[in-house]
Image: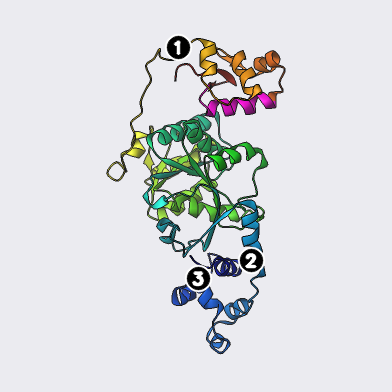
Amino acid sequence: MADQKYWIWFSQLFTFQDLLARKILEIYKTPEAIYHIAPEDLKLFPEDFKKKIQNKDLAQAEQIIAECHKKHINIVTYEDEEYPQRLKNIPDFPYVIYHFGKWYDFDHLPALAVVGTRKCTPYGKAVAEGFSKELSRRGMLIVSGLALGVDAHAHLGALKAGGETVAVLGSGVDVIYPKTNKDIFDLVYAHGAVISEYPPGTSVKKYYFPARNRLISALSLGVLVVEAGRGSGSLITANCALEQGKDVFAVPDSILSQNSEGSLGLIQQGAKCVARVEDILVEYEGQYAFRKTEKKPENETNEMKRDEYIASFQNLNETEKLILETLSSKPLLADDVVSLTGLTAAQVISTMTMLEIKGAVQALAGRRYRLNLNE
């Protein structure tokens, strides 16, 4: 195993954009070798580089390692066997990856990035969740950035399918941004992975987000763009994918919508226009065996009595039970659930999300919900 402290030391001195540092790393192979360059040999290096590597203090690196152990954050360096070849294939690979949750064999998994605008419409939400849900059911690993809007609904779609998902952050893995996505963060942590190239405690900075987009595309076979306006950050991810030789897919939308300008522009430039998941899966069927969607007989669960249906879900908390006992096969407004249960609107909405992920509840347009008896 690589000595983590030297990789962390090196990553703290040089960003992924420092081309000279990368060239010198190619020559010396490891940061540890660079760390031990003899003083008399330093005169051969440019002044800026020489000044940086003269900092031999490993205390910060050791402190980061200790913090990771304390918070159960895993560390994968470029030298480790589990470091993905998909990341090694890009010229601006991260020296160190920090992650919560499961670590995947990305090189042998059909992973797809699903990205789009933070200010998505109901259409964008439905498309992001619907595509991610069905792709996950078919065996795709969904990768996104845990941002508001399309990213959040991409993660939720995968989770609602009972699948797994990966969130790539533009901050330390222990820094949740935006904070309103904490529930989704916890679910991704429990049923997937949260990863970052930044050490724990690293706060959000605007320029970290474009940087993390190259990792979202690099870990994936391709990128699906849902609702991207002109200048959308998701277009950066699409451009990263093109530079990395990855596929770019785009979902069409109304030509009158500002949220469609970027997506339609991608299609005009050659991105594959997709209207169903098969349009994506067909590109990879020769490499991966995707599961077929199995539909339950239409009346299989309808014949169950309501109480038996609710009892079929294990480990429900009292709030979840209360809400399920309030619902039926007929849609009910969230406001009506609030009135009938005495719960707050926030409690109802957050609990509905959990119940939807568990497959017990179906969310409909207009904040209406019903028991998911037809799935």
Is residue 330 visible in this depiction of the protein?
A: no
Residue at 27% x, 44% y: name it. 286
Spatial CA distance of label 3 from label 2 is 26 Å
In the image, is residue 72 above or below residue 338?
Answer: below
Which image quarter: residue 120?
top right
Three-letter amino acid code of the residue under disc 1: Asn
Residue at 48% x, 61% y: name it. 93
Q: Are marks 1 and 2 in contact (CB under 8 Å)?
A: no
Residue farthest left in this picture: 286
Which image quarter: residue 75?
bottom right
Element assignment for label 1? loop
Nearer the viewer's eye, disc 1 or disc 3? 1
Three-letter amino acid code of the residue under disc 3: Leu
Main SS type for the magenta part? helix
Horizontal placement of 271 versus 21: left or right?
Answer: left
Spatial CA distance of label 1 from label 2 is 58 Å
Element assignment for label 3? helix
Name the one closer to the observer, 274 or 348.
Answer: 348
Label for residue 62? Answer: 2
Which residue in the structure is indicated by mark 1? Answer: 302
Nearer the viewer's eye, disc 3 or disc 2? 2
